[in-house]
Amino acid sequence: MDVKRHSSSGESPSALADTRSRQTSARVADDVLLDAARQCVLAVGVRRTTLAEIARTAQVSRMTVYRRFPDVHSVLAALMTREFSGLLQRAGQAGDNAPHARAQIVHIAVASVSALSADPLFRTLLDVDPELVLPYIVERLGATQKFSEQVLRKLIEAGHRDGSVRQAELAVQVRSFLLVVQSFAFSLRPATADLDEAALLAEFRHTVDAALRP
């Protein structure tokens, strides 16, 4: 009886099921799936996280995840971009009351390094799957690094205008500054095994300020 009714309307049962599934998938926000991926990574690391486990954690079907993200790499890339870009945006608020652009950049750099070092996801990535970070150090810049450069570019341009930042070729200055900051972000934990973290960050603050000072 149901089959005949579906047929007369020109839709098969499977077509209607696909429609319902698509509607269900559309109602699941990306952040729900990324939050589930974050839980999985914190529990077992990046390499052991699967789309099936993400689906179970999010309490959705595997097809819901597959329709949004074709493979586990894509969902994890989206997670890392969301988490670290958001972290850097929040760290950017550290320089809101700075007297000039150079001071703002220095505040943001120190806050970013501190926040990344303390971030559970970043720490899990370095502790459990450090080899996954290597390509972003020796092969290519990732989305988060490019986002950081965009922010830095605007700040350094402002510093050129207000005279607080040394004049130099903008692209080279931005890239050089990024390399200094990311080296501290990746290495702060092992570097403070036998040194006081606050003292090392104070020296980092002096280093980046001196690099930008006219």
Image: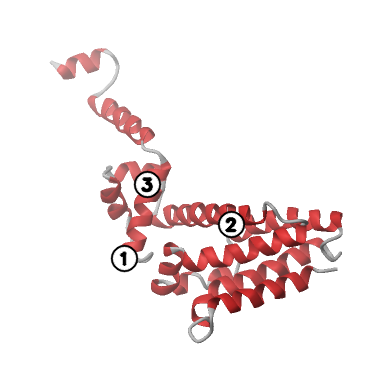
Q: Amino acid at mark 3?
A: Leu
Spot occupied by residue 17 in the image (x, y as percentages of width and height): 26, 29
Spot occupied by residue 133 in the image (x, y as percentages of width and height): 50, 70
Is residue 138 visible in the rendered image? The answer is: no
Mark 2 or mark 1: name the one nearer the start of the chain.
1
Spot occupied by residue 159 in the image (x, y as percentages of width and height): 80, 58
Q: Residue 139 got which mark?
A: none
Q: Amino acid at mark 1?
A: Val
Residue to which mark 1 is pinned: 44
Residue to which mark 3 is pinned: 33
* Label 3: element kind: helix
Crowding at mark 1 (Cα within 10 Å: few <14, some 14-19, many 20+): few
Q: Nearer the viewer, residue 37 or 22?
A: 37
* Label 1: element kind: helix
**Pointer 2 with pointer 1, Cβ within 8 A:** no
Crowding at mark 3 (Cα within 10 Å: few <14, some 14-19, many 20+): many
Instruction: State which quarter of the image contains the N terminus.
Output: top left
Spot occupied by residue 3 in the image (x, y as percentages of width and height): 17, 19
Instruction: Farthest residue to the left: give it.
Output: 1
Q: Is residue 175 left or right of residue 119?
A: right
